[in-house]
Amino acid sequence: MPNINKANRQVCDVDIRSLDRKPVLFFETANTTTQALTGESVYATAKGVKRIAFANPIEGTITIEAQVYPFELYSLISGGVIETDAAYPEKAVVKADADGSLKVPANAMAGSVFVYKNGEFAGTEIAGTFADGTFTAAVEGDIKTGEEYEVGYVATKASGVKRIAINNSKLPKAYYITMDTVEKDENEVLTPYKMIFYKAQPQRNFSLSQSSAGDPASITMTFDLLEDKDGNFAEIVEISDEAE
């Protein structure tokens, strides 16, 4: 096989699988994928000059940076678990259809309903009780038919949602990750090129930022590279018989 010079300018598609090779997430919208391997040595010196080298174990990281990505990507930092229920604060403006009471959204959590005059949210609370989807004012005159009120409550949903719990009891799993790209040679031929990482552990530190100006929000996820139980660390594979 002749040696041909090649160059790369194609971000990788990322195939993430569990260590038993079961697919977890195929991710093809990254803007940047990075692989960094280090294998530093320490040296015995004689009269201050390096004479004998001792190689330290190989270490490394891989990084994925994206602005377009699936919600499932977040789950990698919490063991890949996605819950299908959720509870979160909501604010609604409700018009009273009877004196002394308000109909509150049916999914409001008991004990979480707070009512205010319209325009006074988080101000002076209207005292009362909530049960069976209805808020009843302690003083009937505080709520009048046809007038609007602001209601703060915690909504609960048992379907139609995805939730990822980030806490110290849900730890990230290690994954078998393949990064696929193509290289172009001096004859304009594209050659598939794969980098395989046998055991990649997601780091739990990541940052999110949202802004109404400038570039769209991006997420960066970094994985620490480990050696698997069979001593495998990383491989680089060029598939020349699939060249196009």
Image: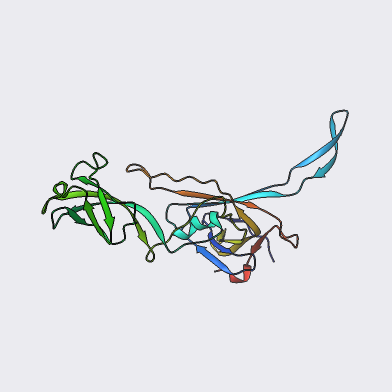
Residue pushed farthest bottom?
A: 241
Viewer-proximal residue among 115 and 84: 115
Image quarter of the N terminus? bottom right
Q: Position of residue 59 (x, y in %)?
A: 69, 49
Out of 237 and 58, give the one closest to the viewer.
58
Q: Please, which residue is most extreme toward the right here?
A: 46
Is residue 220 toward the left or the right of residue 127 in the image? right
Q: Residue at x 63, y 67 (%)?
A: 239
Residue 183 in which image quadrant:
bottom right
Residue projecting furthest to the left: 146
Vertical order, 44 against 200 (above or below): above
**Residue 104 point in image, percent of width and height:** 24, 57
Tell me: 93 left or right of 78.
left
Q: Is residue 203 visible?
A: yes
**Which quadrant is home to the C terminus?**
bottom right
For residue 238, which quarter of the picture?
Answer: bottom right
Q: Classify 21 as above or below 54.
A: below
Residue at left offset 11%, top offset 54%:
145
User: Residue 243, can we see it?
Assistant: no
Residue nearest the observer in this picture, 232 or 90: 90
Task: Provide residue 62's location: percent of width, then percent of height.
Answer: 59, 52
Q: Residue at x 77, y 42 (%)?
A: 41
- Residue nearer the viewer, 154 or 142: 142
Number of marks in picture: 0
- On the picture, is 184 further left or further right than 94? right
Q: Position of residue 22 (x, y in %)?
A: 59, 69
Q: Residue at x 63, y 56 (%)?
A: 200
